[in-house]
Image (tube, rainbow, N blue to C red):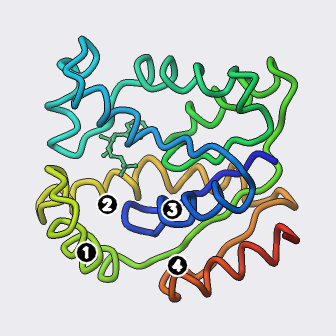
Amino acid sequence: MNIILFGPPGAGKGTQAKYLVKKLNGFQISTGEILRDEIKKNTDIGKKIINNMNEGKFVSDEIVNSLLKIHVVDPNKREKLIFDGYPRSLSQAKNLDILLKDSNQKIDCIFFLNVNKETIVERIKKRKILEKRSDDDLDTILKRYDTYIETTRPVLDYYSKNSNFHEIDGAMEIDQITNKIEGFLNV
Ligand code: AMP
């Protein structure tokens, strides 16, 4: 089963993805984590993207799509992909469709974790203390939220008419959200 977790930064996509990885024996494809890893390892890509990441700006499609592809075409991960943070734009959604089609796969479920701006700001302020992410300061959070509204949220129109699209109130407690997801997945 391939699943997309969609929503603004701080919606809880990563938390639910980690849960689904355990439950379904799947693989979390978090483009944010993949990119942070490039920075940590100080690779050529890491050096190119560090400024954009720190400023809360998108990394180029060229870089994100090539890093994503490695996972989508990996035979071990086939039909066990849990996307967290991808797609983030219409062009990425279309790219994902092509990659999946070429590897004879599809998306089985899309979960939209819907959370308002105030809740996101409060959550990310807490995460800043716990995880010390350099893109979690207030200015950057607000910038990332604006980018979400402008570029990512329109992707909802691309998916929302599908019967496998489910909107979930992301302000609920973590295990309530997990229960909802399990209900839709029938697991
Ligand atoms: P996340 O961990 O999903 O909050 O992502 C952290 C940062 O990584 C984002 O603010 C972007 O700078 C970058 N990033 C993650 N996923 C993508 C993506 N699909 N497209 C472009 N940039 C991304």
Q: Are marks 2 and 1 in contact (CB under 8 Å)?
A: yes
Q: Are marks 3 and 4 in contact (CB under 8 Å)?
A: no
Image: 178 above or below 57: below
Q: Amino acid at mark 2?
A: Tyr
Judging depth in this view, the residue of 31 and 98 nearest the camera is 31
Q: Residues within 10 Å of mark 4 (few under 14, many from 20)?
A: many
What is the C-alpha distance between the residues marked 2 and 1? Answer: 9 Å
187 sits to left or right of 66: right
Q: Earlier in the sequence, mark 4 or mark 2?
A: 2
State the mark number for residue 145: 2
Q: Outermost residue toward the top?
A: 44
User: In which image quadrant can residue 110 be found?
Assistant: bottom right
Q: Nearer the viewer, mark 3 or mark 4?
A: 3
Give the secondary structure at mark 3: helix
What is the C-alpha distance between the residues marked 4 and 2? Answer: 15 Å
Q: Earlier in the sequence, mark 3 or mark 4?
A: 3
Residue 32 percent across, percent down from the top left: 38, 42
Q: Residues within 10 Å of mark 3 (few under 14, many from 20)?
A: many
Q: Earlier in the sequence, mark 2 or mark 1?
A: 1
Q: Which residue does the numbered mark 1 point to in the structure image?
A: 121
Q: Which residue does the numbered mark 4 point to in the structure image?
A: 170
Q: Nearer the viewer, mark 3 or mark 2?
A: 3
Judging depth in this view, the residue of 41 and 96 nearest the camera is 41
Q: Are marks 3 and 1 in contact (CB under 8 Å)?
A: no
What is the C-alpha distance between the residues marked 4 and 1? Answer: 14 Å
